[in-house]
Structure formats: structure tokens, C-alpha cells
Image (cartoon, rainbow, N blue to C red):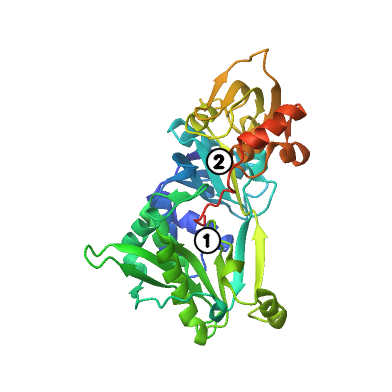
């Protein structure tokens, strides 16, 4: 017998920890502290099977930057099912119920990291944009500035490091996980983690910093988990710190900073790649769309959409597969329906149909990708569930000509 309910730490902690060990998220005793931090930072629902929690979904509140607007979002930080409860449909149903509750609480979008493409598509999620991970020799950085001596940062500094991340430069697509416990959890999970940063001389505020981890302390590779900065000068000072490690550390991996093309900042990148090919310190670039997103509130999202391009108006017939995962106890049933959509400086989506306008058909998966700027309408009509007359699709390509969304926060 299965029961769905809120996580109860006193009753469920040991069972959830067991599930996390079974999926490989807990390998050390201190990782349980990270688990507690995650579960305290948001909403957690469990599926109880024969008296024990065997499936768990956790979300936390955050924001998503859409051009200049901050949109409230639900970020799914963990979906786990135990070894005895696989293939029972629990993960889909608990995730759907969690999203329904978050939508009823005012969250307009949901995001998550995926183990692979396909499963979460059943719940209305569509692929995000590619993120690029660069591995390079820090000595190859073309950084001329001499960075100041930084301060050391440890897990004990998690609160001010989180505040620094929240205040960082944010561009289109940037996500911010609001509970500070989420930063603390990431730091606890980091093997041989360390931080370097700078404080304002007058206020003492941590203005910019980086956090890194490594399995091989002496020569690397090192992985930069994140960099938080507000200006070009602060970014280059952090990169200067990485360059200073180059006399000992042979390779560093980082996710390409939003808007920056790392190849611009490296000496002879192709030569370095050839020389290091198939080595432990191979210089390379890897791209993947590891995150997905879906709209939870279409009118709410478009209300916060402000475009500078020429306006576009159309009917939208929107489908949403999440309804089949929800039972009658949920008031929110997804966003399927017929809408009259206006996109421009002031955008909107209103239920109904206007016979004078062209009609587009889309799944929420595809329309979310269109709205975020992951791919243009004409290409989505080839590769995803979006269709309509070619003229309106071409017009949408010009109206929704957005920068590629980069989340700039791992989840």
C-alpha cells in the first residue's frame, strides 16, 4: 500500500538516508549533513510503501531571470526511489504532486537537472540550452592583471558565500536557489573543497569568490563548482587566481561563464588540446543540456515577459502531459488549454480563441523552450512538438530572438 505525504524528519530521516545511499548520493557520514541541509531548504514529499519512505521528491524556491525580470520558480533538487520501489510509477506521481503544490503556492516555472533525457519529458519538461564545460591548463589563461591576495573560504563561510552568489551578475536564464542551505549542502559534498575570494575593504562584504573541489590536490584536475562576481574586473581577478595556480595545477575544469567564450581567453587552445589528448589533463570542451524546464503558470510567465521586438499575436493550443500523473485531490491540473497569446513589450496569455489570428499547436515542453529562447520556433517545429503556419513561425523567430539561457547555478 502506498501513501503520499510530507516528509517528517523524525519519522523518515533514516529511511530517506537509506534511499540516498542506495542511489549513491551518500557515500560518507558527512554527506548526511548535506542531505539534511537540502531537505530543510524546501518542500519534500515522500511515498510511503509498507510503512517506510521509499520515494522522495524535494524542491526549493528560487528565481529565474527572463531578460530583466525575476520569475519565481520551483527547482527540483532531488528525485530518488529505493531499490525495492522501482518501476511502480512513484517518482512520476510524487513529482507531479509536488509541482502542483508549488504551482498553487505561486511558482511559475519548474527546473531540474536530468539523469537522462526522456523521463521528465513525460511531466512536461523540455531541454534547456547547452552548457559548456572547459578543461584547460590555467597557465594558458590570457589574463594580464595581477590579482590581489585573496581570503580563504571554508564551509563555515557558507552564509556569506550564498549571499555573494545571490548578488552576482545575472543574465538571461540565470537561476538562483534562495535557501542558503543549498549552498552549504553543495560545499559539504565537495571533495577537498576550498574557496578563494575578496571582501570589500570598508564594509567587509564578500563581493566575489570561487569555490573549487578536486580528487587530486597536488596537480589536479581541479573543478570550479561556481564563480560569483558582479563586474568584468571581478571575473578577471578570479580568473587571475586560477592562472596563479598554474605553476602546480595542470588542468582546471569550469562551466563557461554566462556570455563569455572561454576560447577567447586561452593561448593556443587547439595546440594544447592536441598535446594533452587522452591524458589525465586533456584540454577539451564538453557541451550538454543537462537541465530541463517547464512552465507552471502560462499567463503569469507572459505577464513578466517584455520583448523589444515587433509584437506577435496568435492562438495557442497547448497540451500538457502532467495531468495523467495527478489525482482528483489536486486543484492544479497543468496548463493545457486554448489561449490567445500576445508577445511584445507587454505580453499576455488569455484563455479563449480569436478566429482572426493564426493558430499554433504546442506541448508545454516545446513552448517552454521557445519562451526561454532555447531554440527558435521554426527549428522547434522540426525537432519538437510545435507546429503552425510558416509565416507566423518565422515572425516568432524574430520576436523571440533571445540570448541562450544559462542557469549559472548547478542543481
Picture disc at residue 12? none
Q: Nearer the viewer, residue 355 or 10?
A: 355
Q: Residue at x 59, y 43 (%)?
A: 402
Q: Is residue 100 visible?
A: yes
- Which of pointers 1 and 2 lies earlier in the amino acid sequence? 2
Mark toward the viewer: 1 or 2? 1
Question: Disc 1 on helix, strand or loop?
Answer: loop
Query: Residue 119: horizontal and vertical position, in percent?
Result: 67, 46
Q: Quadrant of residue 262?
A: bottom right
Disc 2: which residue: 94
Residue 254 is left or right of residue 155, and the answer is right
Residue furthest left as drawn: 202
Q: Residue at x 24, y 65 (%)?
A: 204
Q: Is residue 1 visible?
A: no
Query: Residue 229: horizontal and vertical position, in percent?
Result: 41, 61
Q: Quadrant of residue 228?
A: bottom left
Q: CA distance from mark 1 to mark 2?
A: 34 Å
Residue 411 is left or right of residue 10, and the answer is right
Residue furthest top as drawn: 355
Q: Quadrant of residue 155?
A: bottom left
Q: Nearer the viewer, residue 246 or 290?
A: 246
Above-or-below relation of 141 to 227: below
Quadrant where the N terminus sits is: top right
User: 10 Å neighbourhood of mark 2: few (<14), some, or many (≥20)?
Assistant: many
Disc 1: which residue: 257
Amino acid at each position: 500500500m502506498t501513501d503520499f505525504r510530507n516528509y517528517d524528519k523524525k519519522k523518515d530521516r533514516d529511511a530517506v538516508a537509506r534511499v540516498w545511499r542506495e542511489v549513491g548520493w551518500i557515500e560518507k557520514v558527512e554527506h548526511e549533513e548535506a542531505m539534511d541541509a537540502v531537505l530543510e531548504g524546501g518542500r519534500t514529499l515522500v511515498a510511503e510503501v509498507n510503512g517506510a519512505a521509499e520515494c522522495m521528491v524535494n524542491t526549493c524556491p528560487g528565481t529565474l531571470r527572463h531578460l530583466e525580470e525575476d520569475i519565481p520558480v520551483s527547482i527540483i533538487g532531488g528525485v530518488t526511489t529505493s531499490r525495492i520501489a522501482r518501476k511502480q510509477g512513484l517518482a512520476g506521481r510524487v513529482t507531479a504532486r509536488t509541482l502542483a503544490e508549488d504551482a498553487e503556492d505561486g511558482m511559475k516555472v519548474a527546473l531540474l537537472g536530468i539523469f537522462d533525457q526522456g523521463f521528465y519529458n513525460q511531466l512536461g519538461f523540455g531541454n534547456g540550452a547547452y552548457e559548456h564545460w572547459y578543461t584547460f591548463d590555467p597557465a594558458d589563461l590570457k589574463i594580464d592583471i595581477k590579482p590581489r591576495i585573496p581570503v580563504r573560504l571554508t564551509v563555515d563561510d557558507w552564509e556569506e558565500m550564498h549571499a555573494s552568489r545571490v548578488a552576482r551578475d545575472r543574465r538571461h536564464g540565470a537561476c538562483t536557489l534562495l535557501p542558503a542551505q543549498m549552498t552549504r549542502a553543495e560545499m559539504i559534498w565537495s571533495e577537498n573543497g576550498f574557496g578563494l575570494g575578496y571582501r570589500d575593504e570598508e564594509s567587509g562584504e564578500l563581493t566575489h569568490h570561487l569555490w573549487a573541489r578536486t580528487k587530486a590536490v597536488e596537480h589536479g584536475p581541479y573543478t570550479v563548482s561556481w564563480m560569483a562576481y558582479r563586474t568584468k574586473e571581478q571575473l578577471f581577478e578570479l580568473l587571475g587566481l586560477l592562472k596563479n595556480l598554474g605553476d602546480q595545477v595542470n588542468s582546471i575544469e569550469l562551466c563557461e561563464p554566462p556570455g563569455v567564450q572561454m576560447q577567447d581567453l586561452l593561448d593556443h587552445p587547439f595546440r594544447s588540446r592536441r598535446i594533452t589528448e587522452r591524458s589525465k589533463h586533456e584540454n577539451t570542451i564538453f557541451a550538454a543540456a543537462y537541465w530541463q524546464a517547464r512552465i507552471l503558470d502560462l499567463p503569469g510567465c507572459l505577464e513578466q515577459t517584455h520583448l523589444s521586438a515587433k509584437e506577435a499575436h496568435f492562438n495557442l493550443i497547448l497540451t500538457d502531459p502532467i495531468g495523467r500523473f495527478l489525482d482528483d485531490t489536486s486543484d492544479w491540473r497543468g496548463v493545457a488549454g486554448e489561449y490567445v497569446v500576445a508577445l511584445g513589450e507587454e505580453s499576455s496569455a488569455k484563455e479563449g480563441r480569436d478566429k482572426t489570428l493564426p493558430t499554433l499547436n504546442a506541448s508545454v515542453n516545446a513552448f517552454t523552450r521557445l519562451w526561454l529562447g532555447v531554440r527558435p520556433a521554426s527549428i522547434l517545429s522540426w525537432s519538437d512538438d510545435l507546429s503552425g503556419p510558416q509565416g507566423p513561425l518565422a515572425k516568432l523567430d524574430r520576436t523571440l530572438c533571445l540570448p541562450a539561457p544559462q542557469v549559472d547555478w548547478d542543481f
